[in-house]
Amino acid sequence: MADEKDVVTDPNEEGILKTVDDLKMSRTEEPEYTVDFEKLRDKIVYDGMGNKIKFGDIYKMQKTIIVFVRHLLDFVTKDYVEDLGMIPLEYLQASDVRLVAIGPAPYKFINDFKKETGFNYTFYCDPERELYKELQLGQDLEPTDVSKSKHVKQNSLMGVLRGMWKIMRVQEWQGDVKQQGGAFIIGPGEVVHYTHIDRNQIDHAPINDLLKKAGVQQVSFPKDPRVQDL
């Protein structure tokens, strides 16, 4: 059974592939949630060079973990993406899974953010947040305790101070500070295997949960150590 925040639609568990029209996922105590590919597939994201990519092309040929993050000056986003970057490429390749992150900032910030976080996988931006809005990713700011996250290594005070320093340095926001993220496992084609909608700043899906749902070997992170098979 899926937990109260996550829903799984997978041919191995359901026995059949659901069509786009039938694909509806519910979360406890929340309204019915629907992924409407008709409205999503032609939405545009941008790579670090400003090239346009249709959202539907991201997951067309391969099962893909797609993580929507918060603004790029957010210390929680930085720490989370750093851990995403620790996933060994061979783990993904062994399961024929692709990893993609999407941020709500202008594309000109992508390359510096990838360098800062050591994230060497695909990163796109949705500066107008069209996908965020269509996927109903939240815009509520709630008090959070970063110590409960399996991926945030910084404390709140230092993280906020570093973020403020960056804002003063670049003198430009790198995404809407209220925008929350989410995570999806989609593909190949318009088949959803997993969805997680972030409720607040640290309600990101634990990365090992994403890997498990995608059929990828799990990873030991600084705050989420795992015993690996030798």
Image: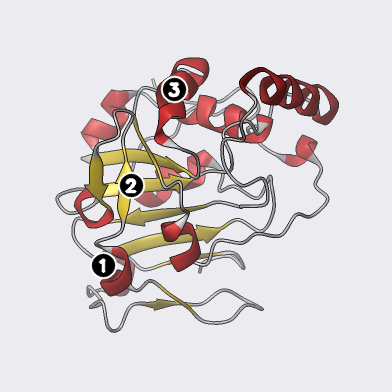
Q: Where is residue 107 in the image (x, y as percent from the top left)?
A: 40, 34
- Furthest residue toward left: 61
Q: Name the residue under label 2.
A: 45
Position of 152 relative to 112 (above/below): below
Marks 1 and 2, the one that precedes in the sequence: 1
Residue 51: quarter of image: top left
Identify residue type, mark 3: Lys
Quarter in which the C terminus is drawn: top left
Question: Residue 99 placed where, x, y %?
Answer: 34, 38
Q: What element carries label 1?
A: helix
Query: Badge 3: few (under 14), some or many (20 or more) residues near its Cα, within 10 Å?
Result: some
Residue plotted at (61% across, 31% down): 172
Q: Name the residue under label 1.
A: 11
Q: Estimate the x, y position of residue 92 in percent, counting from the top left.
A: 29, 34
Q: Are marks 1 and 3 in contact (CB under 8 Å)?
A: no
Give 126 or 3, whichever is nearer the viewer: 126
Amino acid carrying label 1: it is Pro
Rounded to the nearest angstrom, the CA distance separating label 3 from label 2 is: 16 Å
Q: Distance between the residues labelled 1 and 3?
A: 34 Å
Point out the tag, 1 or 3, that comes first from the N-terminus: 1
Count residues near mark 2 (Cα–Cα under 10 Å), then give few for <14, some for 14-19, many for 20+.
many
Q: Name the residue under label 3.
A: 114
